[in-house]
Image (tube, rainbow, N blue to C red):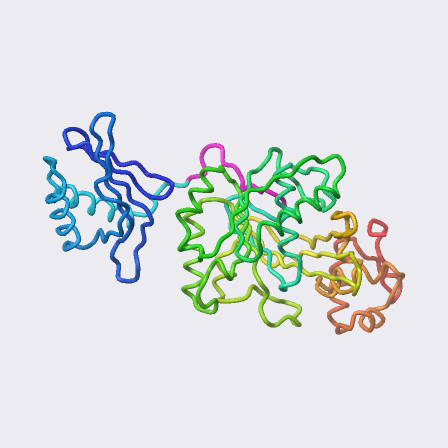
Amino acid sequence: MDVKVTELINGYLLEWPAPWHLSAQVSRLRTPSDGQVRGELEIRHSNGAKESVLLVPTQFNFSSELTRAKFAEKLKEKIDLEIEWREVFDYLSQKIQELARGGEPAIEITTAGDIKPPEYLLYPLIVKNYPNVIFGDPSSSKSTIAVILTQVVILPWHDNPMGLAAPDHSIKVIYLDWETDAETIQWQTVTLQRGIEHIGVMGLHYRHCAQPLTNDLEEIRRDIADIKAELVIIDSQGLAAGGELKETQSALGFYAALRRLKVTSLILAHNSKDRESKTRSIYGNQFFTAQARNIWEVRKNQEPGSNEIDIALFHRKSPPFAGLHRPLGFKIVFDNDVGTMNIKPSDPKTVGEFLEQMGLKSQILEALKSGTMTVSELSETLEKPANQIKARCNELKKKNKLLKIGESWSLASDEL
């Protein structure tokens, strides 16, 4: 008997034709460490226009001979139909195990034909089909930044003051939130909308999450399909991963679940505990960094009592087809009296705290804007060894960015 097998968003549907007229829907598939394939099984029978449920959604071990025999006997006694139940469960279990363990088929990769380069959903922060990460201190405005970025791609907001290359069409986004609540995200969206001229009503698909991603995967996949979302925001990685973040399995399990979503992601993550280090990393196991393909660190600067926040984004890990991007910066200005959020352009090099995070070449170029300096003066100003200053100055000279006048260095005309 030919059985029709259809892949669903959350599993598989198997349909037996006449005379049995059966359908079995399988979802929530998983293969624990014991190697046995388990999932949720529902069986229905169709008799013309009438459909009846023979087995309500039930946890089922597709690898267990005992389970198959028990359910076959149970339905044989319960249902008065001429159906070979043992044959049904044997085929069902064998097929589901093949599908669950089969993985993706091998494909041939060649250089022939029209080969397209990787794409960005939002250049340079979000690479299409990649897991992209923005990490930083708990108070570094990551959620606010994420809300802003969602509107850049949803509107799309082409003349945004951050200088980001918005897509040419509206991108649907779902915001998966483990950290705050819908009211907070909605208020941030409202204040942003009020602060942008000539922008109407904004929208954003939102989902509050309480379980780790691996436990809530099927429902999230269904929401993504219903919305036709091209981008998912995960706020934040620690709670979405669950478990002990220092353990390898926590990171690998999170990214295994993320791959099953088959959608571009922007993941918000916390910073490692060493907050005073100039080179920081994502909190948790090293695989949280290794599995991400495009990573940016956010740093915030705000004077006490000020309603202005300077934001800088530093590229810490580039995608495999590109190099590190220069730091990005912008300013967020809140007006709590009227409930607005304004975004203004800003250069990270103009903020002392951010300049320290940049490479030595950038610091030299910025320092020389105040006038010519010797290597010794640059070394004293930047608090860097003179030999490093000299080497970087010579490199900048070769790139026509600096001129040497006697013992002093100055900016080339193009850098003034």
Which residues, given as a range, are shown in magenta?
110-123
| Image point (74%, 48%), residue name | 339
Q: Is residue 199 above or below residue 190?
A: above
Closest to the observer, 286 or 20: 20
x and y percentages locating residue 117 in the rendered image: 54, 40
The residue furthest top is 48
x and y percentages locating residue 410 in the rendered image: 86, 59
Closest to the observer, 247 or 111: 247
| Image point (64%, 36%), residue name | 155
| Image point (62%, 54%), residue name | 143
Q: Is residue 119 magenta?
A: yes
Asked whether residue 343 appears in the rendered view, the answer is no
Q: Is residue 269 magenta?
A: no
Closest to the observer, 363 or 350: 350
Residue 297, picture quadrant: bottom right
x and y percentages locating residue 68 in the rendered image: 16, 50
Residue 280, picture quadrant: bottom right
Determine the main secondary structure of the stretch shown in magenta: loop
Relative side of 77 to 316, left or right: left
Relative side of 247 to 325, left or right: left
Relative side of 300 to 103, left or right: right
x and y percentages locating residue 343 in the rendered image: 75, 47
Residue 156, picture quadrant: top right
Asked whether residue 119 appears in the rendered view, the answer is yes
Number of marks in picture: 0
For the N terminus, the image quarter is top left
| Image point (75%, 57%), residue name | 309
